Image (cartoon, rainbow, N blue to C red):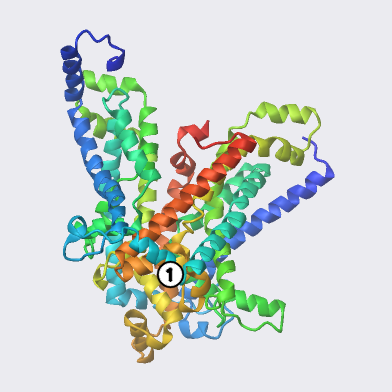
Amino acid sequence: MTPISSKPVVNKASYWKRLWQQIWKRRTKYLMIIPALVFFLVFAYLPMVGVLQAVKEPSFTKGFIRSPWANPWYKYFKQFFNNYQLGTLVTNTLRISILRLITGFPAPIILAILLNELRSTKFKRVVQSVSYVPHFISWAVVVSMLNQLLSPNGGPVNSLMSLLNPEWEPYWFMGEEEAFLPVLLISGIWKGLGWSTIVYLAAIAGINTELYEAAYIDGAGRIRMAFSITLPCISGTIGLLFITGVGGLVAAGYDPIYLMQSPANKGVSEVIDTYIMNVGIKSGRFSLATAAGVVQGALAMMLVVITNFIFKRTTEISMW
Amino acid sequence: MKMTKPQKVFNVFNIAMMVLLCVVTIYPFIYVLAYALNDSIDTLRGGLWLFPRKFTFDNIIATLNDDSILNSFLISVSRTVLGTVIGILLCSMLSFALADKELPGRKWITKYMFITTMFSGGIVAYFLVLRSLGLINNYLVYIIPTLYGFHPFLIMRANFENMPRSIEESARMDGAGDLRVYFNFVLPLNKPIIATQALFTAVGHWNDWFGGMFYINSDHLKPAATVLYEIVSQATFESSSMSSMNARMNTMYASGAATSTPQSMQMAFVVILTIPILMMYPFVQKYFVQGTMVGSIKE
C-alpha cells in the first residue's frame, strides 16, 4: 500500500474515490478513534471555550451559554487585581516555585551522574529501584506520614533531634509558618528525586562510549570525565527540561501545598493555585477564579518565552 | 582501569551517599509500618524507631472495621479496576488505530490531541464542564474524564509501530479483520508495555485524592485517599471542632469500642493504602524506563 499523497492524481473524482476506499477499509480503526475525539472535545476543548467564564457573570440557573456578559468585560480581572491579597499571592507563588526550581532541578542531575559513576551495576539498579518508590505514593499518604514523622509527641525527627541536642524543644513542624517551606521543599525532593533521574540516565546512556575511551587514553579520570564528557553531553536535555520547568513555575505544584495548608501557615502557603480552588470551586465564585487562572496562564507563557529566548541567544538550546 | 587515590575516595563517598539516599527513602515506610503494627497504648510511651515492640494487627482490624473507611476502600478498588481496564482498552485501541501510518488523517488527529497538552482551560472551566455533564457528585467522575491520556497513547503507539509488519500481514492474508489483529496479535505481543501503562493508570486512580475532594460531596462516594487526607487534616488542624470521621475515631477510642488511638488508626490506614502499590512494584519495575520514554529521547 502506498500513501495516497504519492499517487498521481489523475482526476479529482478518482482521488476522492480512492480516499474513500482507504477510509472504508479502515472503518473499524476509525470506530476506535471516534470516542477519543469526543473525549478530547468535551474534556479539553470545551474547557478552553469555558475560559470565557472570566468575562461572564456566573449563573447557576442559566448555565454557561445564556449567562450574561460581565460589565465591563474586565470586571473580574479588575476584582482579582484589586484583591488585597494579590501581593501575598504572587509573592508566595513565585517564592515557592523559584525555591522549588533551585532545590529540585539540580538534584536529579547530580544523582544521575553519581549513579552513572557507580561501578557495580547491581548496586546501581537497587538504588534506582528504591529511589523510584516515593513517586508512586499518593501525596495524601506522604502528608499523613509527615504528620507522624514530624509530630512533636514522640515523632522520630523530634526524638532524634533531642538525642543529638539535649536542649531541643519538641517542635511542631506541620503547624509553624516558618517550617512550611522547608518541609514542602524537602518532601518534594524526597518524592520526585529518583523518578526525575530517568530522563537524565537515558540521556547519559545515549552518550557515545568512544568519547570515554578517547578520554581514558588521554589519561582522564572518572571525575574528569563526568565533568568534561557526561555533563556537556546531556546539557541539551538539561536545558529543555529547565525551560519547561520554568513554565511550571507559576503553577506552583498544587497537591502538597494544598494538603499541607492550614490556617496557621496560610500567610506563606496561599498561592494562586490554592486561591483558585478555594475561591472558585469551594465558594462558587467561578468568574473570579477563572480570571485568576487566565492571569496565571499568561504569566507562565511569558516566563517560558523569555527563558527560551535567553537560552536561544546564549546556548542555542530552544524548545521551538 | 587502575584507580588513583582521589577516585577511590570519590567511590567511597559515592557509595555512602547512595546508601544514605536509600535509608532516607525507605525509613518513613518502616516507621509507619512499625507504628501501625505496634500496640497503640504502647506507642504512646514513645521511643518507637524501627520495629513494633508489641506486635498486633488490632490497628489494622479496627481501621477496616469502620464502615465508612471500608466503603472508601471499596470505592478506591472499584474505580481503580474499572478505570484502568476501560481506560487501557480504549487508549490502546486508539494507539493501535493511529499506529497505522497510512491512515488518512492520522497527522491531524494526533495534532488535535497534542494541542490539549499545551493549552488548558484551567480547573474552573473544567469543573463547570463536569457540572454541566452532571458528573459532579457522581461516581462516574472518577472513570469517564480519565479514560484517555496523551502520554500513554504516545508510548503505546510508538511500541505498536515498532511491531514487525509481517505478523499483521500474514494474519490479514488469513482474513483477520482489524479487531482480530488487535485482540490476537497487538495485545498479546505488547504485554509488557501495556502492563506498565496499566500500572501507571492504576496507581493514578488509587492515589487520587483530588477528585473525591472537589468533585464529590457525598461521603459514601469518596475514595480512600481523600478520606485519609480528611481524617489527618481534621486531626491535625481542627482538633477543637472535630467533625465526622476523626471525631468518631476519638469516641470509639474513648468509649473503649476500639483499642486503637486515632494516630495508630491513621498509620494503619496509610499502610493499607500503600501496600498494594508496593506489592505490584517488583513485577513491573524493570519496564519503567521502557514505559516512560518515547524513542526521541532514548536515541
A19 lies above or below B284? above
Q: Residues within 10 Å of mark 1 (few under 14, many from 20)?
A: few
A283 lies above or below B263? above
Disc 1: host chain: A
- Decide if residue A3 is in sight here: no
Residue B53 location, quadrant: bottom right
A96 lies above or below B244? above
Q: Which residue is mark 1?
A: A83
The furthest residue to the front: A72
- Decide if residue B215 is in sight here: yes
Assign the N terminus of chain A to one quadrant of the image.
top left
| Left or right of B92 on screen, residue A271 | right
Residue A226 point in image, percent of width and height? 71, 40
Q: Count the marks: how many?
A: 1
The residue nearer to you, when weighing B39 against A272, is A272
Residue A56 location, quadrant: bottom left
Residue B195 location, quadrant: top left
Residue B174 point in image, percent of width and height? 20, 20
The furthest residue to the bottom: B255
The residue nearer to you, when weighing B86 against A176, is A176
Residue A171 point in image, percent of width and height? 60, 80
Residue B230 point in image, percent of width and height? 37, 74
Give SS at disc 1.
Answer: loop
Query: In the rendered structure, which amino acid carries the disc numbered 1?
Result: Asn
The residue nearer to you, when weighing A255 against B100, is A255
Task: Tell me which residue sits at (44%, 56%) in the image.
Answer: A296
Task: Tell me which residue sits at (75%, 42%) in the image.
Answer: A223
B265 lies above or below A249? below
| Left or right of B121 on screen, residue A227 | right
| Left or right of A134 on screen, residue B107 | left
Task: Tell me which residue sits at (22%, 31%) in the image.
Answer: A29
